[in-house]
Structures are given as C-alpha cells and as structure tokens.
Amino acid sequence: MAGAATKARLGARLKGLLGLPSRTAGLEGEARARADRLLDVRVVTGRTSPPHALEAWLAQHFGSADAVREQRVVKVTNIATLEATLFAPLRARRPIDGSSGGRNLADEIAATEDDPFCSPETGTPAEPFGRVRGAHMVSGANAAMADAHHAVLVFDTHDPLAFDASLVADLFSTGREWADRARADDAEAANYMLIWNCLWRAGGSIVHGHAQALLGSGLHYAHLERFHRAAVAYRGAHDRDLVADLVELHRDLGLAMESSGVTTIAHLTPIKERELLVIGRPGLDERDPAFTDAVARALIAYRDQIGVSSFNLALWRAPLDGRWPEFAPMVRLVDRGDPFSRPSDIGAMELYGTPIVGSDPYEVMSQLR
Ligand SMILES: [Zn+2]
C-alpha cells in the first residue's frame, strides 16, 4: 500500500502524460481494476545522433539538441475499443514548410461573405418536406448528398466562429427536429448523426457557419457502430458499461470535469489533437440544456482559451428507433490545427496506423479549467 501511495505521489510529480504509468500504478481497488481493463500504456525512448552542424538549428526549433537526442513517446491504447494514440511531444514543434504567409483568418472569413449560405432560401435546395427553422439557423438539403437524408444547417451568421451557447442549443434542437421530420417519411432511417466541420482545415467546403445532419438506415455510421460493438463485448466480458467506465477512468486520472451529470473528458486516446468527449447519462436527450451547455463550454474554451479555429464535432447517440437504450449520448470534438498550415494533419498513420498527437491531455484539461 505504501508502495502504491509513493508511486501515486511520484506520478503526480511527473509532468502531464509522462506521469501516466505511475498515476495508473498508484490507483487502488476498483479504480486500478478499471484502468487495467481499459488501458495499455507504454513510454518508449527514441534516440538520435545529430551532427554538430545541425545542433543550432535543432536548438532553435526544439529547444535543445538534447531534446532531440533522447525523446519520450507515450503510447496509449484503449484495450476495449482499440482506439490508440502515439503521444510524441516534439511533433508539435517540428518546423512545417508552407507557412501562413501573414494571412489573417478574420479577413479570410470576411472575404467570403455574400456566399450562397448568406441567402439559404435561394442558395440551398429545400427538402421534400420543406425546411426546418431554428432560432439561429435554417435547414436545407445538402446539394451533394451522402445518404438518403443529408441536411445542411445554415447558421444566420456568416462567421463560423461567432457561436455562443444559444447557437449550440439551437443546433442540437434544430438537427433533431430535422431528423424527426425526415424519419416521418422513412421509418427505416433511424441512424442520426449531427456533425460540424468548422473551416476548410476540418473539411468544411463553405466558410459560412453551418453544420450537417445525416440520417441513415441499416448499420449505424461505421465508427459509432464499431464503438457500440466494443461496448457490447465489454459488457459481455466484464458486466460493466464501457462509457461509464471511460468516464470513471478519466476522473480517476484527473482528466474529467463534471457539471449537472454531464462529464467532459480530455481523451486519453485522442483521434487527433486535443480531443474532448462530452458524455451524458444513458437515456439523456442530447437537447437537454445540461448537455448542450457542456458542449458549448467546450467549444468556447476551444476558441477562447486554446485558440482553436478549425475543428470537427460529431454527436454520437443511439438510433432514434429505441435501439441501444443503454448508450449514453456523447459529443466528440477535435482540433484540426492552423487553418493556414499547408500539410494536412492527417497522414498514413492516422488513416491506417495509430494517430500521432503532439498535445498533452493534461495540458488540455488545465486549459479547460
Ligand atoms: Zn455567408
């Protein structure tokens, strides 16, 4: 016991994610069992031999040549879902060809005003059932559809970063109203997904503030279907709820923030930089103010505390036909980096291997608080 307590103190002293192995080793009882069920954590050391001529350049870009000579990579895998991340802190500091060239994001956004989404009634097709109007947005059919039902939710305001809590609440209620209307004519279509790709870096083809909603039949959208299958297998193997255990695990490790029964976690296996998960309780409606407020707080912290301008957001919820009653709604949110960076943040490792991430979840959590 004394050993575990010592290890826990040691973990708390080691900065951020590098302290994760000793933090998990310091957990006791059910918390320790939960961490063992869910996490595989490895810290590995990479070594390089820089030539003398390179040292000044390395010091300029990475702080010191020694930081490059010996570097730690933290490899975290969620054993239940096989979501995994290679945390490589130096990656965030590496020099990147193709700089912003002094471009200003607010100017670029303003330069695209008077686009089709500034007049959505004439700039987007309607759907057979018409349009759904919220307090701050109106729906249109996506001109290039990705499923039998695929809407754009066009915000009244052109600037996609001019959002507030009221817009976020309106987004979740307008999206759901659209899904219910679309489903009225197609009962088979129960798999509802609400997504927001903010700016080109995140895959947004139009700058004007907008989100999208999809409604499909058959299996749910693939990433969510896969996660749900992992949750079913986890329940079978451990008689535990995977999402509840994920929340508890992040709380045990100091990576969770709770408000009115909704928890925001700085994810230990982020898909890319600074991933946050906002998680409700099973049966909670995603339009519940406790849930939408937590999503809004995360988005506003992203924009105002962390300086994120381009992000992807997705709502994961149970199908609308009553399947998966045990599945808690969650929003997943990820930072896509500098909109003016030329290289994509997604490469072969992200698509086919294990995502490589430079940001530390402990830093993200302290910025959120
Ligand atoms: Zn516009």
Image (cartoon, rainbow, N blue to C red):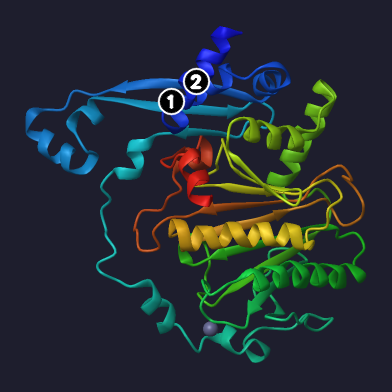
Name the residue rendered at 74%, 83% in the picture.
126
Label count reads 2
Q: Residues within 10 Å of mark 2 (few under 14, many from 20)?
A: some
Quarter of the figure with the N terminus = top right
Q: Are marks 2 and 1 in contact (CB under 8 Å)?
A: yes
Which amino acid does the dot numbered 2 rest on? Arg
The image shows residue 154, relative to residue 308, as above or below, that is below
Q: Label 1 belongs to which residue?
A: 13
- The mark found on residue 89 in the picture is none
Answer yes or no: disc 1 within 8 Å of ligand 1.
no
- Element carrying mark 2: helix
Q: Position of residue 289 (x, y in %)?
A: 76, 63
Q: Position of residue 169 (x, y in %)?
A: 71, 68
The image shows residue 336, relative to residue 211, as above or below, that is above
Name the residue rendered at 64%, 35% in the picture.
251
- Say whether residue 254 is visible: yes
Name the residue rendered at 86%, 68% in the picture.
180
Q: Say left or right for 259 vs 16.
A: right
Q: Position of residue 322 (x, y in %)?
A: 92, 52
Q: Looking at the image, which is closer to me, 283 or 180?
A: 283
Q: Looking at the image, which is closer to me, 170 or 75?
A: 170
How far apart in space, not on screen, are marks 2 and 1 (Cα)? 6 Å
Q: Label 2 belongs to which residue?
A: 9
The image shows residue 210, relative to residue 97, as above or below, that is below
Which amino acid does the dot numbered 1 rest on? Arg
Q: Residues within 10 Å of mark 1 (few under 14, many from 20)?
A: few
Q: Looking at the image, which is closer to me, 16 or 336?
A: 16
Q: Quadrant of residue 47?
A: top left
Answer yes or no: disc 2 within 8 Å of ligand 1.
no
Name the residue rendered at 57%, 8% in the picture.
2
- Say whether residue 273 is visible: no
